[in-house]
Amino acid sequence: MSKASHKQALYELVCRYAQAVDQRDWTALSRLFTPDAVLEGPGFSFAGIAAIVEGMHGLGHYSRTQHHVHNHLAEVDEQQASAETYCVANHLSDAEGVTRKLDWGIRYRDRFVYEDGLWRISSRELLLDWSQDLPLQAGAQ
């Protein structure tokens, strides 16, 4: 597999993460990580697949999320890789009859391992660059 092919596979992996989280597909999410993976961010740290999946259940208080993956720069070295990926994550919630939209500007710093022909996330650090919380406009749902 060429370096370009590995980089494409890594990009697809981070897109699969966004899709699994947004669709609340915990089985698919669990397949993206190594057994000893760590997922960390502001105010949370989950170690191991079971803890990661359980922790992501916290998104359940949002009626919907969308993670939009943008810039993705990866460095590949044999069986390991690292990347920084930009993401804007939209979170919809209802409070007191008002739908709100919380947006996060995220940078993920990832480490990956290549095993058995597949890339998996071994560590993911979520860095929150900015946040915005606003009422959603009528008719926008």
Image (spheres, helix red, strand yellow):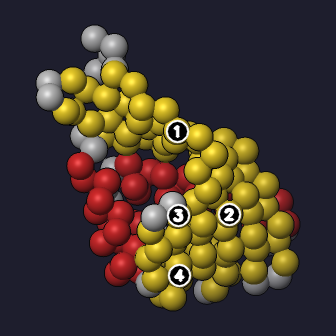
Residue 102, percent from left and from top: 41, 35
Whether residue 1 sits left or right of residue 132 in the image: it is right
Q: Amino acid at mark 3?
A: Gly
**Which of these two is toward me, 7 or 24?**
24
Residue type at the position of mark 1: Ser
Distance, label 1 to label 4, CA atoms, is 26 Å
Secondary element type, mark 2: strand
Q: Which mark is residue 41?
A: 3
Callout 1: SS: strand
Q: Are dots 1 and 4 in contact, CB under 8 Å? A: no
Indicate which label's residue lies in the foreground, 2 or 1.
1
Going from N to C along the chain, the mark reached first, 4 or 2, is 4
x then y, percent, for residue 82: 75, 70
The residues tagged by marks 2 and 1 sit, at their Cα atoms, a distance apart of: 18 Å
Sooner in the amino-acid sequence: mark 2 or mark 3:
3
Q: CA distance from mark 2 to mark 3?
A: 10 Å
Q: Residue at x 31, y 54 (%)?
A: 59
Q: Earlier in the sequence, mark 1 or mark 3?
A: 3
